[in-house]
Image (cartoon, coloured by chain):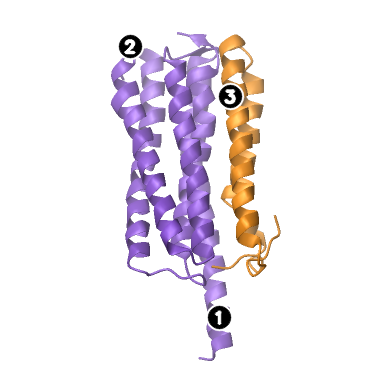
């Protein structure tokens, strides 16, 4: 196979990979949209009785992780491997902090349990399903970080990094909608 | 943002765009928090603000444009 043909083949494969990933995210988003609608229907003008400051804190941490994820991808696409690894490590730390903030702190401080009516069902299902995505994102981040450490990505070929970044930003986008729905909209139940 | 990777300053431009988007997200999130605290019944406004934030993340961090313009940025 000539070099030109190989490049074209890779471009075609990359375009298909991107389409496949976005279709997966689209299908995944249906579940989150469903959860969001459930919250609007069950709680309406009320919201779970949560600490708003803590919500702002974990949201800031997740947004900051997206910022560093973007930096990591840019650094890899320009061949700066040390900066890529450094930024990706920061993303992992921030992601883990978010997870601890929601599951380790917020779940403990919430004055209701999963079985305590609509607010319990809504809050724990929304944050639980989102936390599961953050957790799988952290696993993916570690795999990509380890691959990067072993030098498996190059300026020309780093689809794994791009896919991981897009997935991580998707998790961030979901939280962008969940945060006001859980912490800001309406009066506490 | 239609910036080709082989341009000499593209790295700096991408990083600067990332900083700019982060600044927008931080500012809007703070505004969103204030709206949520002082006027919780404004659900529509909070939804619009969330959609605005999501737009920036999808456009500049997730680079949705790559889906429709594969020649623009290749990995």
Question: Looking at the image, is mark 1 or mark 3 nearer the viewer?
Answer: 3
**Image location of residue A8, percent across then percent down:** 58, 80
Q: Which residue is more in the foreground, A116 or B19?
A: B19
Q: Is residue A91 above or below residue B48?
A: below
Residue appearing at x 35%, y 42% in the figure: A93
Few, some or many C-alpha atoms within 10 Å of disc 1 (few <14, some 14-19, many ≥20)?
few
Indicate the quadrant where residue A144 lies.
bottom left
Q: Which residue is mark 3?
A: B30
Residue appearing at x 36%, y 18% in the figure: A120
Q: Which residue is mark 2?
A: A111
Looking at the image, is mark 1 or mark 2 earlier in the sequence? 1
Residue appearing at x 64%, y 35% in the figure: B24
Which of the labelled discs sits on residue A7, or is there none?
1
Distance from disc 1 to disc 2, alpha carbons, whole Å, reads 57 Å
> What's the chain of the residue with tag 3?
B
Distance from disc 1 to disc 3, alpha carbons, whole Å, reads 45 Å
Q: For mark 2, give the secondary structure.
A: loop
Instruction: Tell me the colour chain B is drawn in.
Output: orange
Residue projecting furthest to the bottom: A2
Residue appearing at x 43%, y 63% in the figure: A81
Question: Looking at the image, is mark 3 or mark 2 nearer the viewer?
Answer: 3
């Amino acid at each position: 196979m000539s070099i030109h043909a190989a490049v074209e083949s890779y471009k075609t494969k990359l375009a298909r990979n991107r389409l496949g990933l976005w279709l997966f995210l689209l299908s995944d988003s249906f579940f989150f949209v469903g959860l969001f609608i459930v919250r609007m229907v069950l709680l309406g003008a009320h919201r779970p009785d949560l600490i708003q400051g803590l919500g702002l804190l974990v949201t800031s941490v997740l947004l900051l992780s997206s910022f560093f994820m973007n930096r990591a991808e840019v650094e890899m696409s320009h061949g700066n491997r040390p900066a890529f690894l450094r930024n990706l490590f920061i993303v992992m730390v921030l992601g883990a902090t978010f997870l601890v903030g929601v599951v380790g702190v917020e779940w403990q401080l919430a004055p209701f349990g999963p079985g305590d009516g609509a607010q319990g069902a809504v809050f724990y299902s929304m944050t639980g399903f989102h936390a599961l995505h953050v957790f799988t994102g952290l696993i993916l981040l570690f795999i990509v970080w380890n691959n990067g450490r072993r030098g498996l990505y190059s300026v020309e070929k780093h689809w794994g990094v791009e896919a991981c970044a897009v997935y991580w930003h998707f998790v961030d986008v979901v939280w962008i909608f969940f945060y006001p729905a859980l912490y800001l909209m309406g009066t506490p139940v | 943002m239609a910036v080709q990777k082989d341009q000499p300053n593209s790295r700096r431009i991408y990083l600067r765009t990332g900083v700019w988007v982060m600044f927008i997200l931080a500012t809007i999130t703070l505004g969103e928090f204030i709206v949520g605290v002082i006027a919780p019944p404004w659900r529509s406004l909070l939804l619009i603000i969330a959609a605005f934030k999501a737009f920036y993340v999808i456009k500049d961090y997730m680079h949705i444009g790559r889906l429709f313009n594969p020649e623009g940025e290749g990995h």
